[in-house]
Image: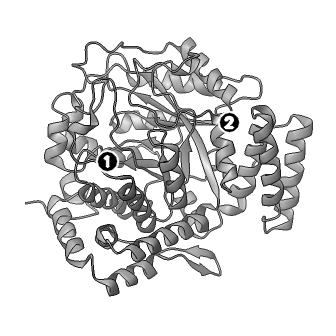
Amino acid sequence: MAVYDPKSLKAEEFINHEEILATLRYAEENKCNEALIDQLLEKARPQKTEQGWHCEGLTHREASVLLACEIPEKIEKMYQIAEEIKLAFYGNRIVMFAPLYLSNYCVNGCLYCPYHLKNKHIPRKKLTQEEVKAEVIALQDMGHKRLAIEAGEDPKNNPIEYILDCIKTIYSVQHKNGAIRRVNVNIAATTVENYRKLKDAGIGTYILFQETYHKESYLHLHPTGPKHDYDYHTEAMDRAMEGGIDDVGLGVLFGLELYAYEFAGLLMHAEHLEAVHGVGPHTISVPRVKRADDIDPDVFDNGISDEMFTKIIACIRLAVPYTGMIISTRESEAVRAKALQVGISQISGASRTSVGGYTEEDRPHDTEQFDVSDQRTLDEVVRWLMQMGFIPSFCTACYREGRTGDRFMSLCKNGQIQNCCHPNALMTLTEFLVDYASGDTRETGYKLIEEELKKIPKDKVRRLATEHIADIKNSNRRDFRF
């Protein structure tokens, strides 16, 4: 029997089934232990120090106790502390991005995805480089600066060379004042050599969802294709980091397996990355199973309520305080609004999950990977965020200034990241307002920026940010960054 070891490079040891079962028993035994729950909440709370903010975080066992807790006032306290943590390290900034689907050719047999090999009636499509350019221009015309590229696993149709060509094309497109400044990559688990190639291509974060950490369920849900190999898939982040990729993004597909099991496995994976590489996940995503072409989410009887979904997000924020947390347009406006209050720091806007969807006037559904619940335009999402008091940020400065991996985390952990992120967010928001926003959004944004500039603590930074914002508005200059 495998023994739990967070420093091991073997999947069955750092995501250990027996340890997860023991964690779930411990959580059940202590879910009404108010003294322990209060102690854990106090441990999770951010502490102000001379160097900035400090958060200890929680272990997978500790966080699982909070997730199991059903005491209403304790849950409210979790939400309050989650918001405190998010504000301490990320402020009121919300990073904006969009997915870009390159190809839906796939050789895997995943039971929850319409791109699976046996689906013979879904149109298969792969973008040419000219079509990639057209998609990028459409995204730039909305105002996007950060993309997450997606492609099915198919060595023949989607080899690494195709992905690299697409990345090169995306970065090359300069249209009016538009530019994609960061490309994150969400493709299948691959080799150290291929991860080095992605690093050399200038990617931002490498994202790979585990789907489920329950090995028996994983093998059932991935009956055929290279993704069937649980260990190879689960150990991918270690190969990515060996290949030089500093920033990696984790995630599970909630609804495939019991949520408490997935939650514990996700946190164990984060602990493993910290133990082995000295830096945890740059991002954690929280997708839920959604309806798609031939996929009925009701056949997976592990669905979670919106209330439990919110609680999961809050508990992840308490456990892994420094990570970026992502919610997509899979979720409705109402669900996303609540999630933003308890820890989410990145959201997508105006997403289309079909191959070539951005150049179509009407949203195509025949090649969508999943239903999009929030179908508002990027302008509408930006205005909505600002009306709630958030700063929509199109900033990519850290990645381009080399503030990645442990360098980013060290700055984030002592709170210093806000000395550059807050003014960078205001400057990139100004770019969006000048170049792409509607009149109402522009008016709302300028008022917000005027108030937010006053909150920059350093006189020099505040003065420079004010000058740069004036240059963006009046001199058509772009891409200032601290």
Residue type pointed to by label 2: Asp
Q: Position of residue 48 (x, y in %)?
A: 60, 79
Q: Residues within 10 Å of mark 2 (few under 14, many from 20)?
A: many
Question: Any mark on residue 379, and which?
Answer: 2
Left or right, residue 13 beside residue 463: left
Give the residue at the far left of this rendering: 1
Q: Position of residue 42 (x, y in %)?
A: 45, 82
Query: Earlier along the polypeptide chain: callout 1 or callout 2?
Result: 1
Q: Cβ–Cβ below 8 Å for labels 1 and 2?
A: no
Q: Which residue is painted at 82% across and 48% down in the image?
A: 446
Q: Is residue 277 above or below residue 88?
A: above
Give the residue at the far bottom of this rendering: 35
Q: Quickly name the residue at label 1.
A: 254
Q: Residues within 10 Å of mark 1 (few under 14, many from 20)?
A: many
Residue nearest the observer in this picture, 273 or 381: 381
In the rendered image, is residue 278 in sight? Answer: no
Left or right, residue 376 beside residue 365: right
